Amino acid sequence: ASLFTAIEMAPRDPILGITEGFNADQNPGKTNLGVGVYYDDNGKVPLLECVQKAEALLIEKLAPRTYLPIEGLAAYDKAVQELVFGADSAVVQEKRAITVQAIGGTGALKLGADFLKRFSADNTQVWISDPSWENHRALFESAGFTVNNYPYYDPATRGVNFSGMLDALKSMPSGSVVLLHACCHNPTGADLSDAEWTQVIDVVTQRGLVPFLDMAYQGFGDGIEADGQVVRRFTEAGGPVFVSNSFSKSFSLYGERVGALSIVAASKEEAGRVLSQLKRVVRTNYSNPPIHGGQVVATALASPELRKLWEEELAGMRVRIREMRHLLVKKLKEQAPGHDFDFVTKQRGMFSYSGLTKAQVERLRDEFSIYAVDTGRICVAALNTKNIDNVVAAIVKVL
Ligand code: PLP
């Protein structure tokens, strides 16, 4: 027997499995709504103009690729911190926040998970929403945590089961880590209202829970500032805060792996100690992050002209998704008047829990070559003015 004789085949990644099926499908009219990627109206992943211009600037002053510091490019970390917390925020002014460049939002979550595992009480457990991004559980489990679900989505109202969520928060032991989606909840598209966040922040603060805010879609909800409010409100509440953020979607830089982990501590001195330990986590995982994506984002955020361009391009993505939500609902209303899809326009971000059942998703795939996630999650950002009629016609047939 070899070392590997007893190794079993791992289960396929559910989302990547959909794309494999889609790629193998010979139907020229096929549509992939299973992805977590923004496509433009031509069905292409955009290469943003602000990115092209930032890259042109970088090419003008080509530099050797030395190692970055363990915590990443200083200009990147600073720009990200100001974006996430606000340049004028108390945490930034008082130097209580530390930010390290990470390998995408996923890498940021893993750094935070490893750090928490090292420095929280042995029996600390992690809580994620039911449902959540499918990698959250696996990431925290692989860091050694027991991961639980708190109630979140309510299929009956197609919104948040807020009382269930709040009750769960009220019964968690002090010190528990609570993973929250800062905006544009993946996979449901259902976010909390401002008033509901107030209550969540109160309970988290009173019970001494540790909020871990995952912000992978800043700018896709109501705008960069508006979407950042939840993070800012948590930092104003005073306790420790973890924030993972990602530019994969907002800069359309998926493959560059640009994200960051920020941690808010009680004082500048405490933050210094936290950073020193976080650097050890980085050092023993991958030593230091890659250079190019961080340079592109730092260049774009530092230049007033490129920053403005980025905000416009991001607004363009946000508005297009919203238009697709409205168009989808309008067309479904015309063709399936007995069904209420209005909730789709209330959801935010790239995704919609469409309410389609597993059986309906299977029929969409088998009969119409339209690929969605078994849970009924569709990527609204993969709809466009060319494929929407086909999608609507198929949905109407399977309803
Ligand atoms: N967190 C959430 C909620 C996400 O949806 C995603 C990506 O889909 C990530 C984190 C990971 O982001 P990245 O691709 O930058 O690793």
Image (cartoon, rainbow, N blue to C red):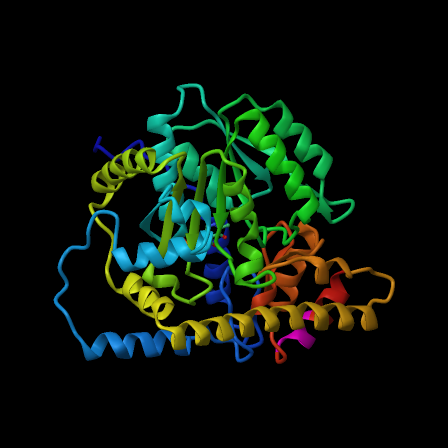
- 272 left or right of 249? left
Image x and y of residue 288, in percent: 22, 49
Locate residue 41 relative to residue 258 in the image: left or right.
right
Q: Residue at x 32, y 34 (%)?
A: 7
Residue most toward the right? 338
Q: Is residue 162 above or below residue 378?
A: above
- Taking depth in this image into account, of 100 and 252 the one nearest to the observer is 100
**The C terminus lies in quadrant:** bottom right
Viewer-nearest residue: 202 or 382: 202
- Can residue 78 be seen by looking at this rendering? yes
Residue positioned 42% across, 56% down in the render: 87
Name the quadrant containing residue 367.
bottom right
Residue 388 falls within the magenta-colored stretch: yes
Q: Is residue 126 above or below residue 365?
A: above
- Front-most of residues 77 and 48: 77
- Asked if residue 17 lies in the magenta stretch, the reply is no
Q: Is residue 383 visible?
A: no
Residue sitting at x 34%, y 78%: 52
Highlighted magenta segment, given as a residue range: 387-391
What is the x, y in percent for residue 281?
A: 27, 37
Q: Is 228 rendered above or below residue 91?
A: below
